[in-house]
Structures are given as structure tokens and as C-alpha cells.
Amino acid sequence: MAPSSDIFIFDRKKIRAQRNRALKNIKENNFLIKWTTNQLLSRLEIIKKEFPCALQVGTRADIDQRQINGLETLITMDGTDGKNSVVADEEFLPFASESFDLIISALNLHTTNDLPGTLLQLRRSLKPDGLFMCALLGGETLYEMRDIFTQAEMEVSGGISPRVAPFADMPQMGSLMQRAGFNLPVVDSEIITVTYDNLFKLIHDLRMMGEGNALIERSKSFNNRTLLMRAADLYQEKYSEPDGKIAATFEIIFLVGWSPHESQQKPLRPGSAKARLSDALNTEEISTKEKATP
């Protein structure tokens, strides 16, 4: 299935290369991915339903299979060369329709070029009444880095090149979930602030997680030392903590949605309500053609 969008933001080949390089030491550098995975599993435990066949999309953090109720088979899928059941691109899912009871993904889908098409494919891969749970980076992520590099590049070279990805925000993700056909979609987010010794340590840790700059429009030349030093100084000036460390924001957007099934709750049809708001508020209902009396 070809991507439904002609907009290409991410260099998918570069992303695979970055994440393959990160595999060697990922367990020492995946604190954010591990935290997010545990958050998803904690939310899943609340749902009183069995999920015999599950798909994990993105495997930089292990899943505790005991936390998935009724699990019999877990298929792991990633675009890297790790030990996965399936090696595939998230934008071209190789699964038949109605294959899974549960699909779960932690910090993997924010670098897809065709997120609407990917969500649609994931929904179609679910059995009726199947559950989709996902976490991905949101629009507030690394806003500090975006700010300081914009200012530093304007000062040093008089122009800017993209260095931080333009992640989606909560309203956009809610619309995409509905567009993909998920029932009962829920979208929320959490802000995580992580402190680092300096900008260079932050960049190093992002690369070790496989989250380096993979934008198609990124500068292909080596980083200018003058630019990096100015950016580091600006970061320290504008976003340092009392202890001298710098703060980096990560917004984690959580998505939950169900594959449609006749047993699920449905919104009431307009005009089908059996009680009036005025009765609940103990007030008098006034026609739009009448004037209220003070």
C-alpha cells in the first residue's frame, strides 16, 4: 500500500540507519522509551479484556508480556535489524486485515511521513473490537532546542535549517484518530522535563536513542563549531536550571482507540435525549423566540 500523503518530512532510510546504530547500547539509553512503554502497559491493565494476539510496533523497549491479559502470541515488528518477528516499515504493514486483538506502540510512529495512512492500516489490522494503544512525541518536544538553534543560526549564518522535527499536537492527533476510523478515541499527553549537563550531552543521548536529526531538509554538511558553541551558550542562558544543568522538554501524546464493533457505545442521535437540560438545572426553558424576563 503506497503512502496516502505526498508530503515527505523524514528520511526513512536515515531513521533506520540511526536506530540500527542505536541497537547496540539501546538498553542503557532508552529510559524515555522504557518509561513510555510502562505507562502504556499500566493503562492497559485497567482494561478488563483479553488480548490473545498482540502486535508491538517498535521494539526499542521490551514489553512485559505478563501485563497483557490473556496474551497467547506477541508479534514484534520494527524496521531495524534487531531480533523481531517481522522486519517491516510502519508505513507498509504486511499484515492481513483483522489480524490482532491489540496493537501497541511506544515512541515509534512520530517519524512516519504518512501518519494518517499508517493509522488507517493499523486500524484495519485490528479485529473488530480490537484495541490500539500508542505513544508518540508531541509538538512541545524539544522546543528549547528548536528555539536556541533558530537564534544561533540567524546570528552565525543569517539563515536557518531544520534541526527538530515538527511533531503533531493533541488536537491534530485526535482528528487523525477519527479520520482513521477508530471508535471511542481518547487522546491525552504528559510533559516530561529531563535535565542534561549541556547541549552536547543532550545531542549525544538523542543519538544513542536513535532520535537524531533525520529530516529530509536537514543540513547535509558537518555542524559548524561556531554555531554549536553559540547554541550551547544560548541554551545555558535561556533554559538552565538553578544547578546549572539545561532542561529539555518531551511531550508524550497517548492515543487509545478501538476497531469498530456493534457492542461498543454509540453517541446519541440529535433529538433522542429523554431529559431536558432545564429540568436538570431546575430552570424554565425559554423558546428562542421569547425574551427572558429579568
Image (cartoon, grey):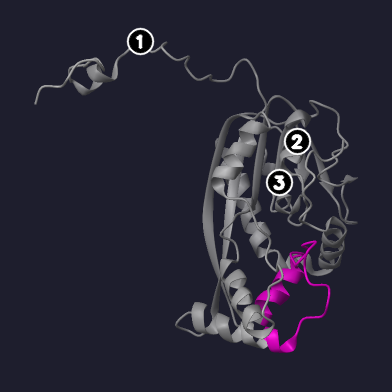
x, y percent for residue 114: 76, 44
* Quadrant (top left/top right/bottom left/bottom right) for the C terminus: top left
Which one is nearer the viewer's eye here, 197 or 52?
197
Residue 71 seen in the current view: no
Residue under the image location 70 percent in, 42 percent down: 104
Q: Is residue 117 magenta?
A: no
Q: Tell me the quarter of the picture where residue 166 sits.
A: bottom right
Choose mark 3 or mark 2, whichever is in front: 2
Which residue carries the number 1 mark? 274
Location of residue 148 with respect to 42 vertically, above or below: below
Q: Distance between the residues labelled 1 and 2?
A: 37 Å
Side of 272 relative to 285 (left or right): right
**Magenta extent:** 200-228
Q: Tell me the quarter of the picture where residue 127 sits.
A: top right
Q: At label 3, which amino acid type do we have?
A: Ser
Residue under the image location 77 percent in, 49 percent down: 7
Choose mark 1 or mark 3, whichever is in front: 1
The answer to whether the residue labelled 3 contacts the one labelled 2, judged by CB atoms less than 8 Å apart, is no
**Of marks 3 and 2, which one's residue comes earlier in the chain?**
3
Q: Distance between the residues labelled 1 and 3?
A: 41 Å
Which one is nearer the viewer's eye here, 283 or 127?
283
The label on residue 266 is none
Side of 81 relative to 137 (left or right): right
The label on residue 105 is 3
Which residue carries the number 2 mark? 122
Which one is nearer the viewer's eye here, 273 or 162?
162
Identify the secondary structure beneath mark 3. strand
x, y percent for residue 232: 62, 84
Q: At label 1, which amino acid type do we have?
A: Lys
**Of marks 1 and 2, which one's residue comes earlier in the chain?**
2
x, y percent for residue 207: 75, 70
